[in-house]
Image (cartoon, helix red, strand yellow):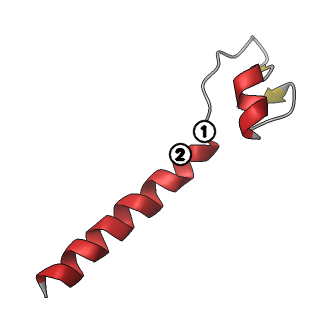
Amino acid sequence: MKKIIVLFIALIVLLGTSSSAFAHSGRTDKNGGHNCSAKSKQKGLCTGYHYHKKKK
């Protein structure tokens, strides 16, 4: 029973951290967007300029 609980917790932790793989750092400009860094492009996180917030 303990093994099942440990495996379940480990699975939750692994699945929880996989969604953060899509996040990337980078400051935004006055429009709420920015260009991707070379490192983010290599990881396939983004391809160019993009927004993080909706424009008003």
Quarter of the figure with residue 7? bottom left
Question: How many C-alpha atoms fall within 10 Å of the one at disc 2: few (<14), some, or many (≥20)?
Answer: few
Which residue reaches farthest bottom? Answer: 1
Residue 53 shows up from this direction: no
**Residue type at the position of mark 2:** Ser
The answer to whether residue 44 is left or right of residue 11 is right
Q: Is residue 10 above or below residue 49?
A: below
**Residue 56: x, y in percent?**
79, 27
Q: Quadrant of the N terminus?
A: bottom left
Query: Residue 13 appears in which quarter of the rendering?
Result: bottom left
- SS under mark 1: loop
Q: Disc 2 designates what residue? A: 20
**Residue lying at 37% horizontally and 66% vertically, measured from the top left:** 12
Q: What kind of residue is marked 1?
A: Ala
As drawn, is 24 to the left or to the right of 6?
right
Say if 20 sits above or below 30 in the image: below
Name the residue rendered at 53%, 45% in the picture.
20
Rendered residue at 45%/52% (across/down): 17
Residue at 86% from the left image edge and 33% from the top image edge:
47
Specify whether 45 is left or right of 14.
right
Q: Disc 2 to disc 1, how far (Cα)?
A: 5 Å
Residue 18 image position (x, y, % from top left): 52, 54
Furthest-right residue in this view: 48
Q: Secondary structure at mark 2?
A: helix
Badge 1: residue crowd in 10 Å (few <14, some 14–19, many ≥20): few
Kindly check if marks 2 and 1 are in contact, taking CB atoms under 8 A apart as contact.
yes
**Foreground residue, 51 or 38?**
38
Q: Position of residue 54 (x, y in %)?
A: 76, 33
Q: Which residue is mark 1?
A: 23
The answer to whether residue 5 is visible is yes
**Relative height, residue 50 to residue 2 (above, below):** above
Residue situated furthest top in the rendering: 30
